[in-house]
Amino acid sequence: MTGRLIGTGSYVPDHYLSNEDIAKIVDTSDQWIRERTGVVRRHIVEEDTTATMAVQAAKRALEDASIQAEEIDLIIVSTIVSDVLMPCTACYVQNEIGAVNAFCFDLNAACSGFLVAYSTALGYIEMGLAKKVLLIGTELLDWTDRSTCILFGDGAGAAVIEAVDGARASICMHSDGSKGDSLLLPRNGTITMNGQDVFRFAVSKVPKVIKELLEQQQKTAGEIDYFILHQANKRIIDAVAKRLQVEESHFPCNIEEYANTSSASIPILLDELRKEGTLKKGQKIVLTGFGAGLTWGAVYMEI
Ligand code: UT7
């Protein structure tokens, strides 16, 4: 018994800032941002909060999964910027959607958060402690600092996982706390990042963890339909594809539209791919997250 993805939903604010808009606020240019990151615009909250975006994404995921909120028995929210420190955002979501039978908690593993939430959900399901789990990544980030505002955007993505017999899933997760200073968000502060260190870390660790996962599953990279990577930088995604010797077309990307939405990026992309019909039953998918901690990991699933 393990978990299978049965629904996705996402929510991004309508309001967006183009690279040209950003260039009016900090010393940068459209060309620099496109060439270094692949980002063209990022959606930014006006009225929304992490909690309200999470609720919208959650409602859409439940609708997509064709289930009632009362059927959910676990809600996990991944965020680094919850509106309040307590209670957890997952409890807020529970109340707003009426998931009265769910146990709720938040977790923080930065940009790897959705992967950690996914693997936690699989753990609960495989232990027989949950049958239907709602996972949400929701983030809104400071975009006024030159070195980071070009990269980040706001949004939320959600997924529903259901316990099924015969589904296949596996997980590889890693952390290296000694590199904590590379990507830091102090309480009440703004993000500081050693971009080059994080870039090198991602390009070296992500292909390794994917290979480790594929070995566990006794699969080759060529057998995987899609590698859905955390949308941190188009150059990172291209470099990983190259190292795995897999065509870039197997690495879907939407960073151009949303920039890096941290733990929301994977579920937003999953949702887009499902809704446009790219993801089909029977496909083999690898999800990969990486970010502050440092943390990184990969999940294999058959949809
Ligand atoms: O999601 C969490 C994980 N995070 C990541 O994966 C981020 C990984 N890192 C990156 O994506 C890249 O390191 C960045 C996009 C953040 C930066 O790109 P880079 O190619 O590493 O640029 P850099 O920091 O080496 O800077 C190159 C040049 C410097 O100028 P000089 O010294 O060559 O004259 C910077 O001052 O670009 C300059 N620069 C900028 N120019 C225009 C740095 N930031 C900017 C900017 N606009 N925003």
Image (tube, grey):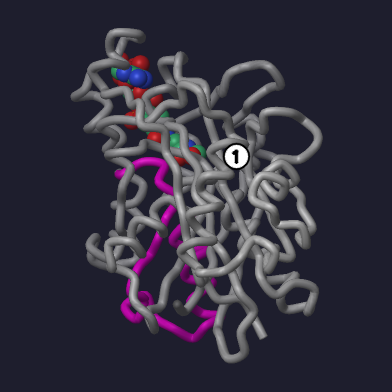
Quadrant of the drawing holding the N terminus:
bottom right
Q: Which residue is mark 1?
A: 292
Q: Can residue 107 be seen at all in this image of the molecule?
A: no
Q: Is residue 145 left or right of residue 95?
A: left
Q: Is residue 45 left or right of residue 186?
A: left
> In terms of secondary structure, where does tag 1 sit?
loop
Quadrant of the drawing holding the C terminus:
bottom left
Mark 1 CB within 8 Å of ligand 1: yes
Please report the bounds of the magenta region as a residue range.
Answer: 205-234
x then y, percent, for residue 76: 68, 54
Q: For the point 74% across and 72% down, which residue is it?
A: 130
Between 128 and 259, which is closer to the camera in this rendering? 128
Where does ligand 1 appear, by image quarter? top left
Q: For the point 47% across and 70% down, which residue is it?
A: 211
Asked if the stretch drawn in magenta spans residue 219, the answer is yes
Q: Is residue 257 above or below residue 44?
A: below
Quadrant of residue 244 within the rendered picture: bottom left
Between 294 and 79, which is closer to the camera in this rendering? 79
Q: Is residue 141 left or right of residue 227?
A: right
x then y, percent, for residue 77: 66, 48
Disc 1 packing (10 Å; few <14; some 14–19; many ≥20)? many
Q: Is residue 248 above or below residue 163?
A: above
Q: For the point 54% across and 61% down, which residue is it?
A: 62
Furthest residue toward bottom: 166
Q: For the point 39% across and 84% down, which residue is it?
A: 282
x then y, percent, for residue 221: 37, 75
Q: How many marks?
A: 1
Asked if the stretch drawn in magenta spans residue 242, the answer is no
Q: Is residue 223 left or right of residue 130?
A: left
x then y, percent, for residue 66: 51, 69
